[in-house]
Amino acid sequence: MTTKQPEKVVIFDTTLRDGEQSAGAGLTTQEKLEVARQLDRLGVDIIEAGFAASSPGDFEAVKAIASEVRRPVIASLARCVPGDIDAAWEAIKGAEKPRIHTFISSSDNQVLNLLRKNPEEVLDMAVSSVERAKRHCENVEFSPMDATRTDMDFLLKLLEAVIAAGATTVNIADTVGYTVPAEFYRRIETIKKKVPNIGKAVISVHCHNDLGMATANSVAAVMAGARQVEGCINGLGERAGNAALEEVIMAIHTRKDALGVYTDVDTRQIYRTSRLVSDITGFPVQPNKAVVGANAFRHSSGIHQDGVLKSRTTFELMDPKTVGWGGTSLVLGKLSGRAGLRARLEDLGYQMTKEQLDTVFEDFKHLADRKREVTDADLEALMASQRRTVSEPVTYTLEHVQVSSGNHEIPTATVRLTRPDGQSVTDAATGTGPVDAVYKAINRIVAVPNKLTEFNVNAVTQGIDAIGSVTIRIEKDGEVYVGRGSDTDIIVASAKAYMHALNRLLAITGQAQLGAAQPRIS
Ligand code: KIV
Ligand code: ZN
């Protein structure tokens, strides 16, 4: 009797393309590079770095990732138009393994209403675009957009034609999250059976989550023979998002018995990747989110706690360590030394040079003075704020913030910032509350009008001494800028978050004004 060897499922990450399309997730090139480096550590096979033709910023980011991140395939999206395909190639040609990913609508609905063309014209555009991409690059992916609402006969004909033109991957996109698992299974099965040259291409799937079935649909497709799955970390993506890659990866890992496939992902990097993406995009992970939510491995009911104490497997499907979560009873505090901190951070997936450790250790000591126990979640917050200090644009630096408020006081704040020219500037303002007063005082110095559209505070851990993490969004000229800050004092965290958002705004728009309100220079 011969046993069937498990086959590999290629993991295609589109956090930096479809994920970045999520409202208000605009990232800088540096931030995208950081996410790409972490996706490389995670071991995804393909990183879709962006949509090169969509803007000069996207082009630069794709190019930067292509030249720096060498192990995975680097893809750029392109519509089926010559200019897009050439721009995609220009951006990725420096990659070790480049891929052009071209797409066009294939459903009657989109062909008629969006493109205002007929299916034959779409077929011609698809074939000529794949041929053009192929002249640049061996590795070409073609996506029929809205494939799950596309007439089956037309879909089969289109797929056969693009494969004959040289497509090496065909990506069946459930663009509006319309399909259901059994139906999607049958669609993939039919494609496998009826496209005569399907053996020359990998079948991929790209599922959106409008009905909450993106992961289930992706897994059903794998069961039917798809061997590439596209998705985003934390389920980011257009509207309700894409399939959450961490869920697909862990479903494949945990249910090898049912699926008979594997991925090359280092699952221990999942938690860290999720936190990095959340921190950079400013989209918090909901506590009950599968695999990476704060409650994903927490047991609260008595029966469950009793079971887990007797044997973890009673109510725990996955070992949290498999996704890089927790895994130690070692608690750090103010007596902990460098070695303990390094060991803990290494367990969490952070490798550091001696110099990096020195800086982190200083911040850690500062935190441990204010907090009895420093948990993994605190360390993650500390590393996130380190990352922001080291790798993000800093035009103005927050030196000092002080507030006075109370039920019979007018909230008043004094702030001191260092300006881009190195001078220290102090100013003060009153507001409706302490945070409002701080923001107004900062505005008097930075003098860049903007609108605060979102303000969120979360406690990183439990307890009165918990670190507060603040996420804000500000808007200027229709563009959104995310800012994050954390501190045991939420007013300080709020000030840090505002400075973070303002510095990003100044870096992206290229303006660094020196203050219009003649503040005091100290
Ligand atoms: O959802 C979709 O159809 C897409 C394509 C560009 C693959 O994102
Ligand atoms: Zn999509």
Image (tube, rainbow, N blue to C red):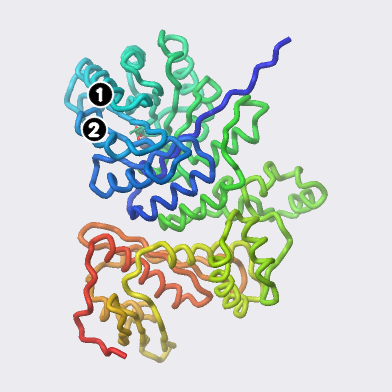
Q: Which amino acid, mark 1?
A: Arg
Q: Residues within 10 Å of mark 2 (few under 14, many from 20)?
A: some
Residue 310 vs 454, above or below: the answer is above
Residue 432 vs 175, above or below: the answer is below
The answer as to whether callout 1 falls within 8 Å of ligand 1 is no
Of 206 and 288, nearer the camera is 206
- Please name the residue shown 34% across and 80% down the image: 418
Residue 332 - label:
none
Image coords of residue 394 (percent x, y): 35, 69
Residue 132 - label:
1
Callout 2 touching callout 1 (CB < 8 Å): yes
Of 149 and 3, nearer the camera is 3
Image coords of residue 351 (percent x, y): 58, 56
Image coords of residue 498 (percent x, y): 36, 70
Q: Going by the picture, which residue comes out furthest to the right? A: 310
Alpha carbon distance from label 2 to label 1:
8 Å
Residue 86 - label:
2
- Please name the residue shown 33% across and 27% down the image: 137
Residue 227 vs 265, above or below: the answer is above
SS of the residue under disc 2: helix
Quadrant containing the C terminus in the rendered view: bottom left
Q: Which amino acid, mark 2?
A: Asp
Q: Quadrant of residue 420?
A: bottom left
First-in-chain label (2 vs 1): 2
